[in-house]
Amino acid sequence: MTNLETRVIRTRRKTMSLEISDDLKILVRAPKHINEEQVTEFIAKNELWLKKRLTKKILEKKKLKSFKKMLKKDLLACKSSSQEMIDKLLEPLAGEMGVRYKKFRLSNAKKRWGSCNARSSINLSWKLVFAPVNVVRYVLVHELCHIKHLNHSKAFWQEVEKHKPDYKNCQKWLRENNYLLSL
């Protein structure tokens, strides 16, 4: 145990305590009047506890690392699914609506489901993969309507309603379920 870095924190307390920090160091909390020899004895007396705790911490770190790796892999799969889903929906929808977009890309946006700029480039949140297809279609219609109207004027909303008559239900769904889609 002595090969681990030890840090002693002296405070106004009456007893000593031990812990293993997240960076695998021994932390000893001790009263101000305790000398180094007493700290060393305390560590030696609790060596078995420290070994068990250190083993547990190392296993936790390995599990967390493995979980993060798995999560990253799943996240990439979700982004890929989102790309495929939008590819299948966006082009035919643009054709039906009689508009052309230059390109679309997926974003990691936290507050917006989509955006469209004056150059007819569309950005969409990859998290749309978790929404019902009807809601995804609404977001796509919304952004495609911005190609004709770069604002939220009355004419814009009339255009949205023309292509997605139930758009208000979709907006409501997004408001009520936003927290489910925000990872």
Image (tube, rainbow, N blue to C red):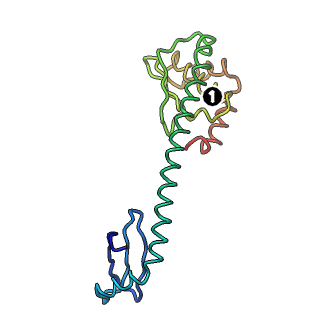
Residue 38 drawn at (x, y percent): 33, 88
Task: List x then y, in percent, for residue 57.
Answer: 47, 64
Choose top left, top right, bottom left or bottom right for residue 32.
bottom left
Instruction: Give the residue drawn at x 38%, y 79%.
Output: 29
Query: Mark 1 falls on what kind of element?
Result: helix
Q: In front here: 120 or 80?
A: 80
Q: Is residue 6 above or below residue 64?
A: below
Pinpoint residue 1: horizontal percent, then vertical percent: 37, 73
Residue name at image x 32 percent, y 70 percent? 3
Instruction: Using the rendered view, name the quadrant where residue 84 is placed.
Output: top right
Q: Residue at x 46, y 77 (%)?
A: 48
Q: Using residue 127 as the reference point, say whether residue 166 is left or right of it.
A: right
In this rendering, position of residue 148 left or right of residue 89: left
Q: Which residue is mark 1?
A: 136
Give me the residue at 60% from left, 10% from top.
95
Q: Quadrant of the C terminus?
A: top right
When the figure is inspected, residue 110 is found, relative to residue 143, above or below; the finding is: below
